[in-house]
Image: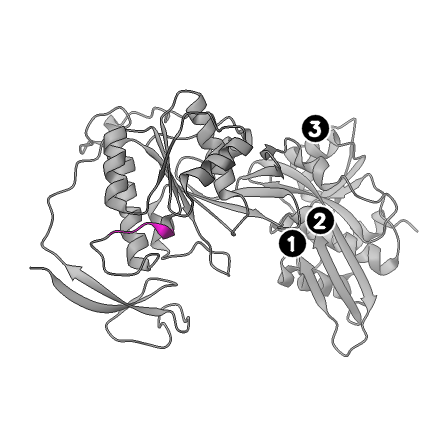
Amino acid sequence: MAKTKTQYVCQNCGYISATFLGRCPNCGAWNSLVEETQSVTPAKAAPAPRHTSAGGQVKPMLMSKVSMQREPRTSTDLGELDRVLGGGIVPGSLILIGGDPGIGKSTLLTQVSGRLASKGAKVLYVSGEESAAQIKMRATRLGVGDSGMYLYPETDMPSISQAIDDMHPDYVVIDSVQTMNVPEMNSAVGSVSQIREVTAELMKIAKTEQITIFIVGHVTKEGAIAGPKILEHMVDTVLYFEGDMHHTYRMIRSVKNRYGSTNEIGIFEMHQNGLAEVANPSELFLDERLPNATGSAVVVSMEGTRPILVEIQALMTPTMYGNAKRTSSGLDHNRVSLIIAVLEKRANLMLQNQDAYLKATGGVRLDEPAIDLAMAMAIASSYRDSEISPTDCFVGEIGLTGEVRRVNRIEDRIKEAAKLGFKRIFIPKNNLQGLPARDKIKVIGVASVSEALDRVFVK
C-alpha cells in the first residue's frame, strides 16, 4: 500500500522543507512554500533503454570508437528559427520555449507545426489551454489550417503518452507544460513536483522514441521560466521569445543549446497572418533615425554570430533636484552609470548635475561590452548639443582609465557597417592589426575616449 508524505516545496526554486517556512532559505523568496502531499509507491519496472538516432540501443563504448558524424537536422522553413536552433531541428531533442503571455509562442509553434506537417511529417499538437476549435481558428488565420497536423486538447499525462505510443508522431508540441498533470502525484497542477515529473516523462519519450518535442513554458514576473531551475537543465534547448507588446517585432534567443551555439538571435515581425522573418534587422532598427538629431550614435553589436546595427539615443538635461537621475531602456543601468563616470573623470565633461536618459531603439536589448563607445558618443553629443555625422558608427569597450579596449569579430562588424552605407567606423586601435584595406568605409582606430571625442567632434 502506498504511503503518503507531506512536504513543503518552494515554487520558485524547488527547495523542499519538512515544515512550513515563511521565507525560502535557498532563494530567499517570501511565501513561496506550498504544501504538497506525495505518495510513496513501490519501485516501478526499469525504464526502457535509450536509443540512438539510428534506432540502435545505447551501450558503453570507448571514446576512440565513437564516430563523429553530424546530427541529422530538419529545416523548419523559418530561417531565423533554424539559425537559433543551430541549423535545424535535431531528432529526439527536447526544446523549451518561454515568453510573456500573448507574445506569440503558440503562434510560432502553430506555424512551425503546420509547415512540418505540410512536408509530410506527422505532428501532434497537444494543448492544455485551448480547445481544438480555437487551435483550428488560429491555424486557419496563419494559413496552415489544412496542413494535416493532429490536435489533441488534453492535460492528462498518461493519456498523452498513450496517444504518442499509438500514433508514433515525428514531432510533438506541448502547450504548455504548466497545464499538464500526472494523476499519481497529489500536488496541484503547475507545482514544482508536477512540472518536474512531466518534463522527465517527456524527456524519456523524446530519447527512447527519437521524437522531437517542443514545450511551451510560462514565465514569472521576473522574466524567468516558471518552475524549478531543473526544468532548464533537463531539456536540450532553451529558447526565450521576447518582444515589446507596443511593437510588432519579436526576438527569439537561445540561452542553452546542446546542438548549437548559444546567444543566437532570430528576429520576426508579427502580422495578422502570423510571424514574418526579418532578413536584415539592421535596416529595421535604423529606419526611423533622424539625420540631424543630437544624442544619437550607431553601434555595431554582435548577437551570436550576427552583426546588428542599432541606434543608441541619449538625452542629457540639467537636474532639478539634488541627485541626478539615471534612466535606461534596453541598456544595463550600471553600465550607463559607469560610462558617465568615466566621461566626467577622463574627458572633463561635467555630468554630475545632468539627468541622463538612454535608450536602445527598436525594443532590442544590448548587453555586450562593445557598445560602450557608442554610448559615450551619444552622451557627449547630447551634452554638447552637437550632432554626430549620420554616416559614423562606433565599436569599442571603455575601461575605467578611459582606454578603448579591443573587441571580437571586428571584421564582421566592419562588413555589416559598410554594407549599410556607413562611411566611417571608429574601433579600438588594437583591433587595427591585420585588418585589410577598405574602399567603401574608413576605419579609424582610437586609443582612448578623449581621443575619440576629439576626432568625432572636430572644433
Between 139 and 263, the one lying in front of the other is 139
The image position of residue 453, as x and y in percent, is: 82, 52
Would you say the residues marked 1 and 3 are in contact, meaning their CB atoms lie under 8 Å apart?
no
| Residue 26 seen anywhere in this rendered image of the structure | yes
Which sits earlier in the primary sequence, circle 1 or circle 3? 1
Residue at 64% over, 60% down: 335
In magenta stretch: residue 179 = yes
The residue to which callout 2 is attached is 361
Task: Return the mark for residue 330.
Answer: 1
The image position of residue 415, as x and y in percent, is: 69, 31
| Residue 409 seen anywhere in this rendered image of the structure | no
Between 381 and 443, the one lying in front of the other is 381
Give the number of the mark in front: 3 or 2. Answer: 2
Mark 3 neighbour density, 10 Å: few (under 14) some (14–19) many (20 or more):
few
Mark 2 neighbour density, 10 Å: few (under 14) some (14–19) many (20 or more):
some
Tell me the magenta residue range.
178-182
In magenta stretch: residue 113 = no
Tag 1: residue type? Gly
Query: Is 137 situated above or below 438?
Result: below
Tag 2: residue type? Thr
